[in-house]
Image (cartoon, rainbow, N blue to C red):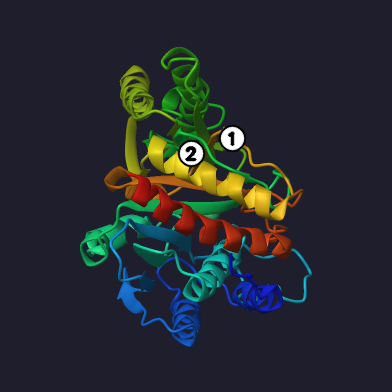
Amino acid sequence: MKPLAVDTTFLAELRRDLHTHPELRFEEQRTAAVVAQHLQNFGYMPHTGLARTGVVATLDTGRAGPAIMLRADMDALPVSEAGQVPWASCNPGVMHACGHDGHTAMLLGAAALLKADPPPCGKIYFVFQPAEEGGAGAQVMIDEGLFDLFPTDYCFGLHNWPGLEAGRLGVRTGPIMAGGWRFAIRITGKGSHAAQPHMGTDPLTIGAALVQEAQLLVARRTDPVIPAVLSFCIFDAGTTDNILPETARLAGTLRALDPLVLNELKDGLQRLCDGLGVAHGVDIDVNFHQPYPVTVNEHRATQIARQAMQALEVQLGGPAPDMDIAPSLASEDFGFMLQKKSGAYAMIGNGESHKLHSPDYDFDDSIITRGVRYWHQLAHTCAAAGHAA
Ligand SMILES: [Zn+2]
Ligand SMILES: [Zn+2]
């Protein structure tokens, strides 16, 4: 086997540069330009502009074999960075709080490494995707022809995971991330004096009942062995302490690892709002938006990912991979890709860092090499599996 070099200093500097210049969903202009420039430097001719800022590079070995897509997300979050690292965000109110800077750097490293040491057959598409955070950028790329322009057999994703040992890889067959809906609720009642509640219809008290009763949907309307969660995250009502307000605004999210449970929760919340509205004589309007599907790992693709992780453990040592990692009720728009193609979404430990989306979070640069090597090994394992098929 050829000696393999990953330029970790270069990739860590690249990651920190991206961290300093975070961009929100569909606004990743600088990030996309940096990605495209590096890909050109590595000898690729990147396709740009898919889903506005998406970038795709193709490595064609010229020999028949499996076509695989390796995907990184590029967008940051509307979070104000609290950490004091020298490479902290210079874009106020915007931060790489989910480590997509690290994902982008790892996939760029893989593009460089695979150019130097390609698999013996097949094609590799390196997909740099915009707007994972609430923008369903994966779906927009698909709508704009991702799989027509770049026909692929498998899609693979990789996300850093705080709380998992640094550099430890993990994957599982079946659902790995939850499907979800966001919801916004507006209760319109009738305001009144705080001492005369009977003269109005108080949306605040009805809203409080709604928050409580919605938990019964999880406790009593869904199969207890299938993970599900329903969380209210906004409850906004009133202006002062002696007037009952006219309206209340609530918002939140519901998640489940099974699409049927997800539908039951959504229908149940709609029924609850309708019923409470009738019972208390108020208007309760519910708006469901931002549907994300369950991210479901296909068995054969997951086996390939497992083989790659095992091979990497033999080559590099280090933490043994978790071959049946626990799923999460976080959501991920990679699920849209796995609705169309076989594939597997994996985790790489970010160590004992702050949690994802925390203003103190930072990506651990020490895991970049393992992430790059995982992508590289996965491409080779896929090619070998393709020969065997
Ligand atoms: Zn995130
Ligand atoms: Zn993320």
Which residue is under mark 2?
A: 245
Find residue 184 and report its horizontal and vertical position in percent: 40, 42
> Disc 2 on helix, strand or loop?
loop
Q: Residue at x 49, y 71 (%)?
A: 111
Horizontal and vertical percent position of residue 3: 64, 70
Q: Which mark is residue 58?
A: none
Looking at the rendered image, the disc whose residue lies closer to the viewer, 2 or 1, is 1
Neighbour tally class for label 1: few under 14, some 14-19, many 20 plus, Cα within 10 Å: some
- Please tell me whether residue 154 is drawn above or below residue 330 in the rendered image: below
Instruction: Answer above or below: position of 209 versus 340.
Output: above
Quarter containing the N terminus:
bottom right
Q: Residue furthest front?
A: 1
Return the residue nearer the eye: 297 or 283.
297
Callout 1 amino acid: Ile
| Drawn side of residue 127 relative to residue 321, left or right | left
The location of residue 230, given as percent across then percent down, is 49, 30
Q: Nearest the camera: 279 or 196?
A: 279
Neighbourhood count class around disc 2 (C-alpha, 10 Å): few under 14, some 14–19, many 20 upward? many
Answer above or below: position of 64 versus 296: below
Whether tag 2 and tag 1 are in contact, CB under 8 A, the answer is no
- Disc on res. 325: 1
What is the three-letter code of the residue carrying label 2?
Pro
* Residue depicted at x 40% and y 81%: 44
Is residue 214 or residue 305 the one in the foreground? Answer: 305
Residue located 52% across and 27% down the image: 208
Of helix, strand and loop, which one carries label 1?
A: loop
First-in-chain label (2 vs 1) = 2
Whether residue 99 is visible: no
Question: CA separation, marks 2 and 1?
Answer: 47 Å
Position in image of residue 205 (x %, y %): 51, 27
Q: Is residue 6 visible?
A: yes
Which residue is drawn at the image coordinates 35% and 70% (left, top)? 61
